[in-house]
């Protein structure tokens, strides 16, 4: 039994080191490619203005619905060819506020309609699917409640659809509240890197659910929205790719958005995304493997679907380290300090380079890239959350929808049952780190200390969110 366990642990260790090496190569390639990137622009739209449906799926968004609605009403597009659709799944008090705002916008001549869902079926995709039954517009723009599209959004995005193979056009997100805390700064770094370095110039890494426009014909061709999909944007991106459609990202078209303001909100958002990724892998993994697409394209789709598969391996490895380093559990291979430090330096160095390039392109502050090492404890701290959520989605479990609070609020959703488990893990890793340092095993001591600090950061941050919500 011990021999089998050591083989399994060794396989996990090898897999993690292989992923680390591939990640370093990928980060370096993306950074170098982005350095040479130039903005892809399309010629102005020629001909009559197309019919556009703008969908605003909202749920208890009292803090931000007014600014969103007026921003969308200010879009520069002929009113005869524009329909703004608010699909409201809120509780009664919030629905009343939204209805009053819609009436006020109508009074100003805005082409706004309100669809109320008293008993919502499905998640956000359910709202979007319901709205599509009320419109035959050729293009569909989607904005979450925290988005603030610029007035020229449609004028700049629609010309990209001159290419008949383009299914969607995605704008880049910006984050006015990025300096609120270390947590928001780190979120902004990750998302800037996603939008600015993770894909070739002009090519979208996917439809991201907000700040984008869809060609209605492509949406209908793949069966529309699937209301059961928790990560409806990822689900649709994969189905469009399997059908041969592609997306365009306009790097210089920017839609300001909010970031989760505290650890509790951020944790719920990440849990939802990881669960949705597991769902999508379960639903589409086999189809991607057998698709008649170039090998590179299939690999990219599988990498996106399975990106959270890393975290169960990382958690297993973290739990095994105290036994393999302190309790002398035998492992077949010995990597040595040089290999481990080299891999760590390669991953951090190339990741820092990628973040730096993204921040330069974003017009932000390149010095923020110096915060990149702080992503390590944050990722380690979220490992239990990612593991449970991803495996739950992959195995067909059900997860109730929890919205991410907007407008700086800290509400919605109870305290995760993982928090007490995480506190125990943090204490255990801290104790193992002390023992490792006492025995002179400094590298693994540092790893265990980083794991302990990250898990404690997430757990204590979640407790603070729950405490503030309770006081409010």
Image (spheres, grey):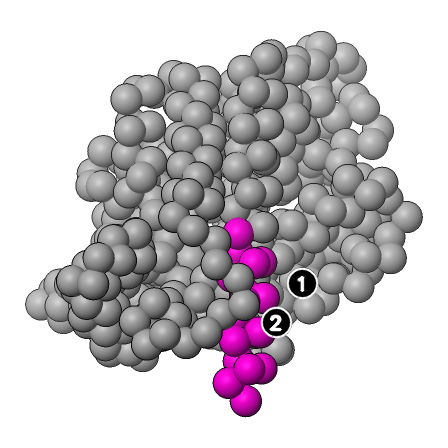
**Visible in this render: residue 464?**
yes
Part of the protein shown in magenta: 1-17
Q: Is residue 230 left or right of residue 190?
A: right
Which residue position holds label 2?
394
Q: Quick check: is 7 in the magenta stretch?
A: yes
What is the chief secondary structure element of the magenta stretch? helix
Q: Secondary structure at mark 1?
A: helix
Name, please, the residue furthest toward the right: 292
Graded by Cα atoms within 10 Å as few (under 14), some (14 to 19) or many (20 or more), the crowding at tag 2 reads many
* Residue shown at 57% from the left, 54% from the top: 307
Q: Quadrant of the N terminus?
A: bottom right
Q: Quick check: is 103 in the magenta stretch?
A: no
The residue nearer to you, when weighing 22 against 302, is 22
**Alpha-carbon distance for marks 1 and 2?**
7 Å
Whether residues under marks 1 and 2 lie with C-beta atoms below 8 angstroms apart, the answer is: yes
Which residue position holds label 1?
281
Q: Quadrant of the C terminus?
A: bottom left
Q: Quadrant of residue 41?
A: top right
* Residue shown at 53% from the left, 37% from the top: 24
Q: Secondary structure at mark 2?
A: helix
Q: Quadrant of residue 148?
A: top left
The residue nearer to you, when weighing 66 against 22, is 22
Residue 220: image x %, image y %?
80, 50
Q: Is residue 32 left or right of residue 242?
A: left
């Amino acid at each position: 039994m011990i021999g089998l366990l050591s083989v399994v642990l060794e396989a996990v260790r090898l897999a993690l080191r292989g992923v680390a090496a591939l990640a370093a190569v990928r980060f370096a390639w993306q950074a170098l490619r982005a350095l040479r990137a130039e903005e892809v622009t399309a010629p102005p739209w020629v001909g009559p203005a197309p019919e556009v449906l703008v969908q605003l799926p909202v749920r208890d968004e009292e803090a931000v619905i007014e600014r969103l609605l007026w921003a969308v009403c200010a879009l520069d597009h002929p009113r005869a060819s524009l329909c703004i659709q608010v699909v409201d799944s809120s509780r009664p008090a919030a629905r009343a506020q939204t209805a009053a705002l819609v009436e006020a916008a109508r009074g100003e001549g805005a082409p706004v309609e309100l669809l109320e869902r008293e008993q919502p079926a499905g998640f956000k995709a359910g709202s979007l699917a319901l709205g599509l039954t009320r419109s035959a517009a050729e293009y569909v723009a989607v904005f979450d409640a925290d988005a603030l599209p610029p007035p020229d959004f449609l004028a700049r995005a629609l010309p990209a659809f001159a290419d008949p193979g383009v299914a969607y056009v995605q704008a880049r997100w910006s984050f006015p509240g990025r300096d609120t805390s270390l947590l928001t700064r780190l979120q902004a770094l990750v998302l800037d890197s996603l939008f600015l370095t993770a894909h070739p110039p002009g090519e979208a890494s996917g439809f991201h659910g907000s700040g984008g426009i869809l060609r209605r014909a492509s949406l209908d061709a793949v069966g529309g929205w699937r209301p059961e999909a928790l990560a409806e944007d990822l689900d649709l991106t994969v189905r469009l790719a399997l059908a041969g459609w592609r997306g365009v990202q306009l790097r210089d078209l920017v839609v300001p958005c909010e970031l989760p303001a505290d650890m509790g909100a951020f944790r719920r958002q990440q849990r939802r995304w990881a669960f949705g990724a597991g769902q999508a892998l379960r639903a589409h993994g086999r189809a991607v493997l057998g698709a008649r697409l170039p090998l590179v394209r299939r690999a990219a789709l599988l990498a996106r679907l399975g990106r959270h598969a890393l975290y169960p391996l990382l958690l297993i490895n973290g739990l095994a380290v105290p036994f393999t380093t302190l309790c002398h559990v035998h492992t077949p291979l010995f990597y040595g300090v040089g290999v481990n430090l080299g891999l760590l330096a390669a991953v951090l160095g190339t990741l820092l380079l990628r973040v730096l390039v993204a921040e330069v392109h974003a017009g932000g502050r390149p010095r923020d890239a110096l915060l990149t090492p702080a992503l390590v404890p944050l990722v380690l701290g979220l490992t239990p959350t990612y593991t449970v959520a991803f495996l739950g989605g992959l195995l067909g479990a059900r997860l109730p929808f929890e919205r991410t609070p907007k407008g700086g609020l800290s509400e919605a959703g109870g305290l995760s049952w993982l928090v007490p488990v995480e506190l125990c893990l943090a204490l255990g890793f801290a104790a193992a780190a002390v023992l490792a340092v006492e025995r002179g095993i400094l590298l693994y001591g540092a790893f265990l200390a980083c794991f302990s600090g990250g898990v404690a950061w997430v757990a204590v941050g979640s407790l603070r969110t729950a405490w503030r919500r309770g006081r409010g």
